[in-house]
Image (tube, rainbow, N blue to C red):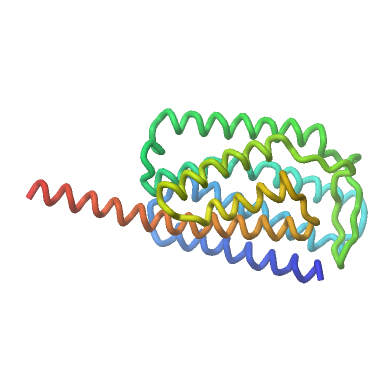
């Protein structure tokens, strides 16, 4: 059952990956959030592929090393997505979202949390600290002492604040739904591994759809502003 679910997760992430590529090919205004989201989906896709390949490779240093790499990649995703959230607020023309102060604070937070994640990964995620798990046709390695990274909690909390801000200012609910599920799962109600993986996929799709919607809204608003300026000139 878990193997089937993991294959489904891979298919969903591939679809998300392709959707972002289509948005970028359509010539819509591209912003940092889209590029970062593209990178995040790629990192999570690698994560799921490594998990799926575990039973084929078998236990050993190769699989342990691949799992260490996927864990490191996964740890770097949350702080990067902070920038995506603030880019969404800017594209949706939320007041104050594009100021230099907001941009400096967000990038500062992102780098600070990124540093926390690197420090946590360097100390908690090592080959010696991993142990194999076999469940439902899957074979993968996890930390022997699973700890919630402080950077992940901080990044998810910042994302929750921005998602709530987006909901209040633009009535678009998907970012809050996605990060809300992740925050509840990672902080309050930890779920089994395969369920947590599914929640991450739902989260990514809420961001992919928000990215598409934000760019559509941005185009509409930008065109409206241009028409207004032309009317005033006329």
At a point 49% along the width and 46% down the height, the residue shown is: 33
Q: Above or below — where is 104 with respect to 157?
A: above
Q: In which quarter of the image is residue 157?
A: top right
On the image, the x and y values in percent for residue 77 come to 64, 45
Q: Is residue 120 or residue 192 the one in the foreground?
A: 192
Task: For the N terminus, give its image quadrant.
Answer: bottom right
124 relative to 92 in the view: left or right: right
65 relative to 105 in the view: left or right: right
On the image, the x and y values in percent for residue 5 come to 75, 68
On the image, the x and y values in percent for residue 168 come to 44, 47
Of all residues, the one furthest to the left in this rendering is 234
29 relative to 12 in the view: left or right: left
Number of numbered discs overlaid on the protein picture: 0
At a point 38% along the width and 58% down the height, the residue shown is: 216
On the image, the x and y values in percent for residue 72 come to 74, 43
Q: Is residue 23 or residue 136 the one in the foreground?
A: 136
At a point 86% along the width and 51% down the height, the residue shown is: 141
Q: Is residue 113 or residue 56 the one in the foreground?
A: 113
């Amino acid at each position: 059952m878990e193997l089937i679910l993991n294959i489904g997760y891979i298919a969903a992430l591939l679809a998300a990956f392709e959707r972002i590529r289509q948005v970028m090919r359509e010539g819509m205004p591209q912003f940092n959030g889209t590029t970062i989201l593209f990178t995040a989906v790629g990192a999570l896709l690698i994560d799921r592929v490594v998990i799926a390949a575990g039973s084929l490779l078998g236990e050993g240093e190769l699989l342990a090393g691949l799992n260490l790499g996927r864990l490191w990649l996964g740890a770097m995703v949350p702080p990067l997505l902070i920038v995506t959230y603030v880019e969404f607020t800017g594209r949706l023309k939320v007041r104050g979202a594009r100021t230099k102060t907001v941009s400096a604070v967000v990038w500062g937070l992102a780098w600070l949390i990124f540093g926390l994640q690197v420090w946590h990964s360097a100390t908690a995620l090592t080959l010696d600290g991993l142990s194999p798990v076999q469940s439902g046709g899957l074979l993968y390695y996890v930390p022997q002492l699973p700890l919630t990274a402080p950077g992940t909690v901080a990044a998810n909390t910042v994302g929750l604040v921005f998602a709530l801000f987006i909901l209040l200012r633009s009535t678009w609910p998907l970012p809050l739904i996605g990060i809300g599920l992740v925050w509840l799962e990672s902080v309050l109600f930890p779920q089994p591994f395969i369920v947590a993986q599914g929640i991450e996929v739902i989260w990514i799709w809420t961001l992919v759809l928000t990215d598409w919607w934000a760019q559509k809204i941005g185009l509409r608003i930008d065109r409206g502003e241009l028409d207004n300026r032309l009317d005033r000139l006329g």
